[in-house]
Image (cartoon, coloured by chain):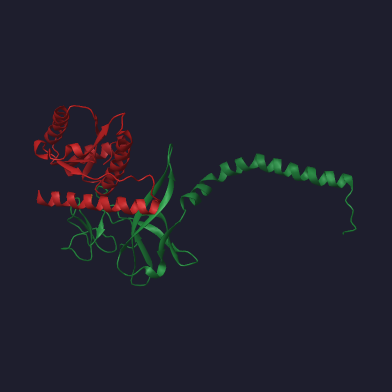
Amino acid sequence: MLWNAQEIDLFLKEKAYIDTVVIPLLPVSISDGTRQEAEQAEFISLLTAMLERQFKGRMLLIPAFTYMTSRDHRAKIEELKSWCDELSAQGFAHTVCITSDTSWKGHEEELDANIIWMPSIPLHHMDDKYKRKIVDDQVNQLIKIIVQKWQSA
Amino acid sequence: MSNQRVSRRQFLNYTLTGVGGFMAAGMLMPMVRFAIDPVLKAEAGGDFITTGTAEDEITDVPTRVDFTFEQVDAWYTSEVTQTAWVYKDGSGKIVALSPTCKHLGCTVNWEGNPDEPEHFFCPCHNGLYEKSGKNVPGTPPTAPLDMFEARVSDDGILQLGPVVPNTIVK
Ligand code: FES
């Protein structure tokens, strides 16, 4: 389900069936990294939107967890952890964070969540057909990871 | 050259009638449009989109066909990609099923579960559909898969139209 009024109504009604929540993790800064971060945001948003389309009936895509790149790493982790704790307290069996930010690598155990790291691909120079193919491939990978997660639960 | 000379008066008459005609049409058209608008709308909604699949590529095995078109909503024009599961039924008629699960809207896959051959499978809550799109009782979906209107263009390319309720499930 998407984070909009119409779909949230359905979500509230069918909550029992929606056991997975997806959080995009997006860094923001105005610095040398800005360009890359914008690219990441574009890519991750596209990816999560397509993932949601596949699994609309079982996952809720919530607004991204955004943070200033310069933010202290510990504070960031604590903050995300409180999101994850809250969500699992609300009954979500699976919390999936999707990001291109390498700084999250190796922190999964601290969070009660899966962090899936996808290398960001600069899409804006590609022609449409190629772009679609690349994104499709990435989405298929994500689909596999998530189905596996569901099956092993 | 014709011998029938057009006099100045005739010329003016013709031109003014012509211009007047356009003006009248300009005024009348919106009114006519307004009156028959529902008719025009139905036609606009009935647009078919040409896919990249030729008719002779379609077999009796449901195959994924992606097609893209531009969608305009209140604020954005966006490229939308949709998917259909396309095959030919016993009599050679093209069937194009919508992949949207009738339970809560996940995307279903043909033989998506190896344990359920010859079925569409929904990975979200194990929904099952027969090849015709008929939902298998006892699984969450309560209605058959919708279908796209399908036709073949003059040069043999599959074209897909609006989504309609399933007509082949009895
Ligand atoms: S959304 Fe397909 S079975 Fe629930």
Q: Position of residue A95 (x, y in %)?
A: 16, 40
When asked about the image quadrant of residue B63, the answer is: bottom left
Identify the residue at horizontal 20%, vertical 43% (top origin). Answer: A117
Q: Left or right: A103 with respect to A126?
A: left
Q: Position of residue B108 (x, y in %)?
A: 26, 55
Q: Position of residue A128 (x, y in %)?
A: 39, 51
In the rendered view, tell whether residue A153 sits above or below residue A74. Answer: below
Can you say which quadrant of the picture contains the C terminus of chain B? bottom left
Residue drawn 9% across the image and 39% down it: A109
Viewer-proximal residue among A116 and B167: A116
Query: Does residue B64 show up?
Result: yes
- Image position of A83 with respect to A118: above or below: above
Q: What colour is chain A?
A: red
Q: Residue B1: where, in percent of width, then height?
A: 87, 59
Give left or right: position of A133 versus A13.
right
Name the quadrant containing residue B129: bottom left
Please give the count of numbered marks on the rendered protein: 0
Regarding residue A18, the answer to whether it shows in the image is: no
Q: Is residue B168 above or below residue A97?
A: below
Question: Farthest residue in the front direction?
Answer: A32
Q: Chain drawn green, letter?
A: B
Farthest residue, direction bottom: B91
Residue appearing at x 43%, y 45% in the figure: B71
Relative to the observer, which residue lies in front, B147 or A146? A146
- Name the quadrant containing residue A13: top left
Rendered position, A39 above or below B159 = above
